[in-house]
Amino acid sequence: MASAPLSNPKPPSSDDLAQTRSTELSDHLGTIARNRGWTWPVLSAAIATIGITILAIVHRLIDLGTYLLGGTHAFRADLYHVKYAPTHLGFTYPPFAAVLFSPLSHLPVRLDQILFSWISLVALFGVLFVSFRATIPALDRRSVVWWAMLLLTPIGLLDPVRETFLLGQVNILLALAVIADMTVVPPSRRGYLVGVTAAIKLTPLILVPYLLLTRQRGSGLRALGTFIVAGVATTALASSASKSYWTHDVWKPNSAGWLPWVGNQGVVGVVDRLLGHTISSLTTFSLVAVIVVIGLSIALQTYRVSSPLLAFLVIEATESMASPVSWSHHFIWVILLIAWLALASDRPAHGKWWAALVAVIFWAAPFWWVPHGPSVPFAGHGWLAPIADAFFIVFMVLVLATLVSLLRRARPRRRLRNERGPLRESAGL
C-alpha cells in the first residue's frame, strides 16, 4: 500500500525567523559570557570607576555646580535669578529638580562630585542592563551582568556619556528611568518614572500623548498624574520659585545658553546655524510643533504595525530633534538604539553594521571638529553643515527610515485589498 504523499510544510513566517535569530544570538552571547571569566568585565568596571573618580577630584563639574546652586536656592524666590559664577548661567530646570538637589547642596563640593559621579556610573550600568533586557530578553541575567560590566568603559566613551561625566549632568539617571519605564516595567505599573522624569526635565512629556494615543491609557494617566503631583507638591514647598518658573522662565529656552552653538543638535540649533542668525520665538515653537506632530505620527503607526521598542526609539529621536535646547550630552538613549540595531530580533538588515556606524559617530562626535567657539557664533556653514549636524542627521535618518519601512509594509496590504475587491464583485458580494 502506497503511503500518502506528505503535505508541504508551512513555510516559516518572518516572526518565526526573527525569533530563531534572537534565540541563536542569545545562546551565542550567553556561551561567551559563561566560557570567559570575570577578569575583563571587572577590569572594564574598574577603569570606568577610577577614571570618573579622578575626574571628579581634579575637574570642576560645572553643570553639577549649577544644580547644587539650585538646591541651595530651591526654597527662595531668587531661584531663577541667581547665576553660577564659573558659567554665568542660572538654574533652568523645573523647581522640583532644585528641591531634589537641596540635600546635596549642604555637602562639600568635591564629595558631591564624587558621589554624583559614582551614582551616574551605576545608572550607566543600569542603562546597559535594561538595554540588553529590552532587545534580547532571552539572555540570562548572569550574561546580561557580564556584558553590561564589560561595556562600561567603551560605552562610557560615547560623546553623550563622557560629556555627562565631564559636566556632572543628570542625563544618565533620567535616561535610565525613562528607558526602564518604557521597556521593562510591566504595563500595569508603567508611567510613574516617566512622570517623575518629566517633573525634573520637561522633554519626557512627549511620552504622555504617545502613551495615550497608543491606547496605553493607564500608563499615560499615571505619567501625567505623577508629573502634576510633583509640581503641586513643589509649589507648596517653594511657591515663589514655582510661580516664577511656570509663568515666565519656562518660556525662555535661550536662558539655557547660546542655542546656535554647535553642541545644540536639535532642529532649532541646526536651523540657526544654517541661516546664520537666530530665529524668532514664533518660528521656534512652529518648528518644534511640526517635528513633534510628524515624529509622533510615525511612532504611533510603528507601535501599531511594527515594534513598540522601535516606536519608543522614534519618539526619543523626535524629542531630541524637537527640543529647542538639545545639547549633545542629552542623547544617552542612543545606547538603546545601538543595542536594538545590533541585537533585537526585529533589527533591520545589516543591523550590526548600522550599530557600528552609529557607535563610531557617537564616539567621534564629528561636530566638535568644526571650528567653533565665542568667535564663531554660527559654526558649520556650507559643506561643513553635515559634520556640524551629525547627531541630528542620525536622528532624522532613524525617523525617515522607519517611515520608509512603514510604507513598504503598507504596499502588500493595499495590493491584497485591491485584489480582493474584484473577487468579491465577481462573487456577487
Image (cartoon, rainbow, N blue to C red):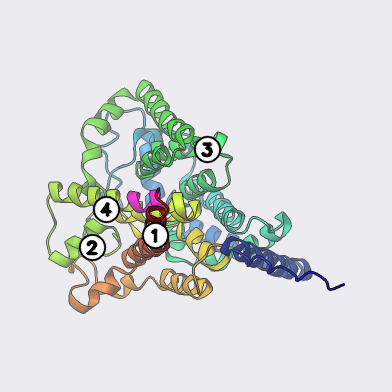
**What percent of the width, then of the height, locates residue 312?**
45, 51
Dot 1 and dot 4 residues touching (CB under 8 Å): no
Name the side, left or right, on which 334 lies relative to 209: right
- Rounded to the nearest angstrom, the CA distance separating label 1 from label 3 is 30 Å
Span shown in magenta:
296-301
Q: Which residue is mark 3?
A: 190
Mark sitting earlier along the chain (3/4):
3
- Rounded to the nearest angstrom, the CA distance separating label 1 from label 4 is 23 Å
Q: Which residue is mark 2?
A: 270
Dot 3 and dot 4 residues touching (CB under 8 Å): no
* Residue at 14%, 57% in the rendered image: 278
Mark sitting earlier along the chain (2/4):
2
Q: Residues within 10 Å of mark 2 (few under 14, many from 20)?
A: many
Q: Which residue is mark 4?
A: 291
Chief secondary structure of the magenta span?
Answer: helix
Kind of residue indicated by mark 1: Ala
- Rounded to the nearest angstrom, the CA distance separating label 2 from label 3 is 34 Å
Q: Which residue is mark 1?
A: 410
